[in-house]
Image: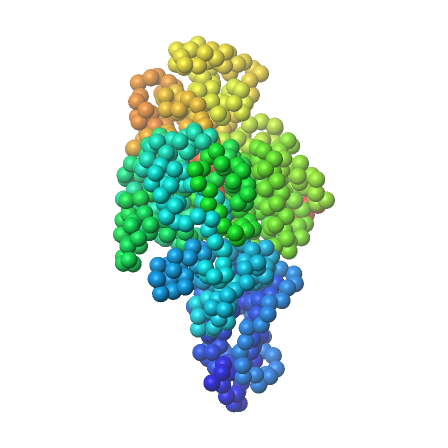
Amino acid sequence: MPPGGSHAGGMERLRVRVRGTVQGVGFRPFVYSLAHKFRLGGFVRNDGEGVLLEIEGEGAREFVAALRRGPPPLARIDAVEMQRIPALAETIFSIEVSTSGETMTRMSADAAVCEECLDDLFNPRTRFYHYPFVNCTHCGPRYTLTRRLPYDRAQTSMAPFAMCEDCAHDYRDPSNRRFHAQAIACPRCGPRLDAPIDRIVGCIHEGGIVALKGIGGFHLMCDARNEEVVSNLRRRKQREAKPFAVMVANLATAERIGVLNDASRELLLSAARPIVLVDKSMDLAPSVAPGLSRIGLILAYAPTHHMLFHAAAGKPASPSWREAPIDFALVATSANMNGAPLIVDDAEAREKLRNVADLIVGFDRVIVARADDSIATIIAGAPAYPRRGRGFIPEPIELATDGPDMLALGAHLKTTVTVTRGREAFVSTHIGDLDDRASVRYHAETVARMLDILDARPACVACDLHPDLYTTRAAEATALPVFRAQHHAAHIAAIAAEHSIEGPLIGAALDGFGYGEDGGAWGGELMLIENGAWRRIGHLAYVPLPGGDRAARSSWRMGVALLAHLGRGAEAAARFPQTPMAPQVARLASSRGCVRTTSLGRLFDAAAALLGVCLEQSYEGQAAMELEALCRAPHATPELFSLMDGVLDLSPLFSRLIDGTLSEIEGADLFHGALIEALSAWILCEARRRSEKRVALSGGCLMNATLAQGLVVRLREKGVEPLLARQAPSNDGGLSLGQAFLAREALNAGWSG
């Protein structure tokens, strides 16, 4: 009997609106099957607000309860709204054509290939055998191939690929897992790789570098166990020391390389498949992550990746190989040069990567939106995301209250864009540092795409307080009122946004550089935010910043600066004999005209330099990361800091580091231990003065797991709950979220621009 069955007395018809992540996740097929189960008539369709359905029959109420209880794996239901309407005595349930209109729904993020599709991929009896683009309603690309909503094939980069008879049959069959799977394809009708898998694996085995197109862009891949090829990749990519991620086949292989716990295993196996930072347990090539104790691991997530590992394992027939350790690991790093955006176009890859990769492999499906791999870590016992990209974008962060649409442009480093709509904040994928024209274009493209796909109409645009940033000028070039948010206030506001905080909040913003209200170089601040306004209520003691931005790259300069700050500048030449300019920099640091900073990030640099750990940095945060890698048992001795009127002075700690009696490990332990004690005392003093039971902790320095964990423990011991970034990055990747939050709060409080 068709859905609906007999319509006796007592029937009702319900119109049901479902909001959330309900397009591109198999929601309409799920509703169809559920309606069939409950013998209901009606229809379901996608539209600009999500999914709309009408149901009619005696089991209508039970249907709605089941819908709430067990949606498809990738769906996220935010709201189910119902109203009774006149019955039509309808006996058939159908899936109707999507309608457009103002977009109030959202698409789902890209998801790793599911186990059922992997079964198809390695089953010779299916037409998807060894087809690298197999997918279904439960997995595969979504965001990266969607041009517009509603999510239908015609709105994606799969539109040029007409379904063959078999795929069309699966697409129309309600009992099939690929019923209305918009990206369905097979070897007869779908995209194709430029090169066979055996050739790719052969190139890697022979010590070559492969540029392989993936879900969100090209990866550069090579054998992670081969030091010669990894060093060669560094040279060709012009990436001196920044760590590479390593891709492995499965969890069993990951267990051999990294130290995993339940939280990291869950992250690795999640549908988002982020890069997960874990302690190393087995050495790969030394150049994979030089000077660091942690490594970034990622599990294969696209069918192509699984085919590579299958071929490397000798093409075993038994499916058990998918669970067994494999002696094969791949460097998998974004294919870009000198900080430029991730390459997504095949022609661009052939042009720009010809001197980097020995083999370039693309395919004939367009990547609509770039998406770098996300990076995840465990901070104080829970996940945190230094980089939020593929697998999480465009999932929104829910805000405490409704409000006007906002656009926030971020700052300069690790830039993201945020658009708010109603109670949702959509933080863009990682854009990167805005150091070149390509990155600036990518930023502008991201703004345009987000506003378009969300149908957002911003009431104002928010940017950083710094007057000379590209993002500030871009904000000023719009026709919207411009809200300028102080850098560290935005860091604290981002925490308030994702934790749904209403009312005043104090927090510590601990990072490298942010433009202060006095025009100075801030970076270690206690802030109070309320109603879109902010106030600096404490800071680290100022120290010299000789050379300005150059001090962030040459950590020896900060070592010299601390010598001069403590009246020991005359020792600079002896302490840094390899840097002839050390005496000159010491004199600059001692002068009254030298720029000064409160940056905690620069104090990490100074400590690393004074301990001989890192004198020059080839990537942001290198000195701090290498210093943390040496830390074994952080501890502190009394009187390593002073605190007066909200100013925290760490001069006693640096006097101890300078005395020359500590090894690198001893110095790292003492530095981290003293920071934990000093910063927690500083924060607690202000929290107690204001009778606050919660504080925000944000800024790039909170990516240091040792520091973050120590602060969390100390603050909780004293009855204060620390709020950390859990959904957006605590580094500058979360600034746009904080800017949008502050601007919206200010508008609600009466700010008019």
In depth, the one of 681 and 631 nearer the eye is: 631
Picture quadrant where residue 202 is located: top left
Q: Is 306 situated above or below 211?
A: below
Q: Position of residue 751 (x, y in %)?
A: 68, 45
Q: Residue at x 64, y 31 (%)?
A: 468
Q: Residue furthest bottom?
A: 8
At x 43%, y 55%, the residue is 132
Q: Nearer the viewer, residue 115 or 11?
A: 115
Q: How many marks?
A: 0
Evaluate whether residue 735 shows in this view. no
Image spot of residue 490 (x, y percent)? 56, 40
Report the residue at 38% width, 65% height from top.
Answer: 126
Q: Position of residue 329 (x, y in %)?
A: 33, 43
Q: Is residue 576 above or below residue 50?
A: above
Q: What colour scheme governs how the chains and residues are painted in the rendered image of this protein? A: rainbow
Q: Between residues 26 and 553, which one lies in front from this camera angle? A: 26
136 shown above or below 202: below
Residue 648, position as x, y percentages in the image:
46, 28
In the image, 182: left or right of 453? left
Residue furthest to the right in view is: 479
Residue drawn at the location 58% of the way across and 33% of the way down: 436
Residue 612 in sight: yes
Report the quarter where the C terminus lies.
top right
